[in-house]
Amino acid sequence: MGKKRKQQQQHTDNSVTASLPKQEAVTLADQLGGDVLAKLKAAKQDLTAKEQAAEEERQAKLAFERKQREKNKSFEELLNEYGDKGTKY
């Protein structure tokens, strides 16, 4: 019995969407209105700008930490890393 109900519900759902022509189909943007849609777009732009700024800050922090680690290496660590590959200058 459960299968028949599910099939009937699916059939009625499909018939409702199929009966509306594409021109009369209501989109979410139409339902929200221009004012709310503009606010959502502004919020999205703000969020992407914040995410980009946070990513840039993270990259700068990683570069600074890398530089500090290189600066604070001991002679032994530098010798192990570079060995006899040094140049005259």
Image: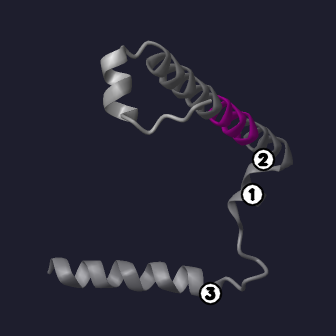
Using the rendered view, name the quadrant where residue 51 is placed.
top right
Q: Is 33 drawn above or below residue 10 in the view shown?
A: above
Bounds of the magenta span? 44-53
Amino acid type assigned to the residue bearing label 1 in the image: Ala
Q: Callout 1 environment at 10 Å: few (<14), some (14 to 19), or many (20+)?
A: few
The image's colour scheme reads one colour
Amino acid type assigned to the residue bearing label 2 in the image: Leu
Using the rendered view, name the quadrant where residue 43 is placed.
top right
Instruction: Indicate the position of residue 78 as horizontal and vertical percent values.
Output: 38, 24
Q: Quadrant of the C terminus?
A: top right
Q: From the viewer's side, name the closer residue of 84 and 62.
A: 84
Q: Residue furthest left?
A: 1
Mark 2 or 3, closer to the camera: 2
Q: From the viewer's side, name the closer residue of 56 and 8.
A: 56
| The magenta stretch spans residue 47 | yes
Q: Are marks 1 and 3 in contact (CB under 8 Å)?
A: no
Q: Left or right: where does residue 27 sit relative to residue 59?
A: right
Q: Residue furthest front?
A: 88
Q: Quadrant of the N terminus?
A: bottom left
Instruction: Indicate the position of residue 59 as horizontal and vertical percent values.
Output: 57, 32
Secondary structure of residue under mark 2: helix
What residue sits right under mark 2 in the picture?
Answer: 37
Q: From the viewer's side, name the closer residue of 81 and 17.
A: 81
Q: Measure the alpha-carbon separation of dots 1 and 3.
A: 21 Å
Q: Left or right: where does residue 88 sit relative to residue 40?
A: left
Q: Are marks 2 and 3 in contact (CB under 8 Å)?
A: no
Q: Measure the alpha-carbon separation of dots 1 and 2.
A: 7 Å
What residue sits right under mark 1 in the picture?
Answer: 29
What residue sits right under mark 3 in the picture?
Answer: 19
Q: Are marks 1 and 2 in contact (CB under 8 Å)?
A: yes
